[in-house]
Amino acid sequence: MKSLLSIFVLFFLLSAGTLQAQQQYTVNGQTYTLITEVDGPLTLLWNTVDGEYRYFSKKGNDIEELKNTKQNGDYQEEYKETLKQQTSDMAISTEKVKLTLSGLHAFFVEYNKKKDPNFGEETKSIDLQFRLGAFAGISNSIFTENPTNVLQPVAGVDLEIFDGVKLNRHALVFRFKQTFESSDYKYSASQLSLNYRFKFVKTPKFDAFINCKFAALTFFKTEQTKENELTSSKTKTNFNAPVTFGIGADYKVGNGYITFNYNDIVGLSVESNNEFPVDFTLGYKFNL
């Protein structure tokens, strides 16, 4: 337990100092809390609003949203005209600018260097974000004996941590999972695990990811009844690196996300009981 908690504390302390300052701005009568990505003669502001990435360009006291609406299946690329108007005092093309944080970042830096020879870009910090959720489901606990392949109820909580800027497809997840014993299989377990997720599909509304559990601390209890009807029980605490893989998806609903996981499909460093894996959970998480 102390080892896993130490990893969390170290990660948090190293990351906490890099959080970006956020400030409120009013654009067309609407107030937004925005992050400053590039600060100079032309300032790039952004944030996620209702699950969508929103970008703004600030020149002097004028703030314009950079839009790319879709009509009849075609993107209109209005942001290029907005940038063209705001940078008309410099010879700089907007034709190849992409409406992404990295694409806009490069364009704004290029303009500011042309506008102000003394412009110097500061080292970019990250935008550390947190999501907290709860889940419930069923599992046949294939990495235990489970001789009759019994399904057991499970429940728990997830704390997801990710960088919303450069590494938004990657996440670190601290998970607590409780497996409850059933009438046919007297096995219960409390597990705290450290997981890595790669989001191979990422949109404002939907994410799909691969989950790798690479460290786990498990406290479990089992009871066995022998032929002479004597019951023996065993409790044990185990810390290991199971390296198990699963898949999952998040779908945005309201201010949070419905999340579905197919957990622990295959393990590289643990032995299964050779049953087909059944470990499904459904839950809901929200931004902290």
Image (cartoon, rainbow, N blue to C red):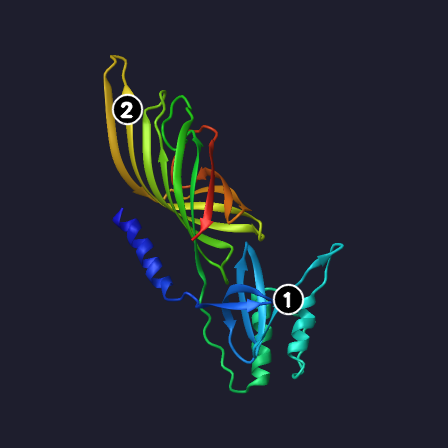
Q: Residue at x 42, y 29 (%)?
A: 140
Residue type at the position of mark 2: Glu
Along the line of sight, the residue nearer the viewer: 73 or 263:
73
Q: CA distance from mark 2 to mark 1?
A: 61 Å
The residue indicated by pointer 1 is 98
Q: Considering the numbered disc 1 on the image, is that residue within a helix, a strand or a loop?
A: loop
Foreground: disc 2 or disc 1: 1
Q: Residue furthest top?
A: 228
Disc marking residue 117? none
| Disc 1 residue crowd, few under 14, some 14–19, many 20+, Cα 10 Å | some
Residue 94 falls left or right of residue 119: right
* Comes first in the chain, label 2 or label 1: 1
Does 59 appear above or below 282?
below
Along the line of sight, the residue nearer the viewer: 271 or 151:
151
User: Can you give x and y, in whole percent of width and height, for residue 172 in the image?
Assistant: 42, 52
User: Circles 2 and 1: CB distance less than 8 Å?
Assistant: no
Does 54 appear above or below 172?
below
**Residue 185 position by quadrant:** top left
Along the line of sight, the residue nearer the viewer: 12 or 20:
20
Residue type at the position of mark 1: Lys
The residue indicated by pointer 2 is 223
Question: How many numbered marks have been drawn onto this rendered protein structure?
Answer: 2
Q: Residue furthest bottom?
A: 117
Q: Residue at x 65, y 64 (%)?
A: 67
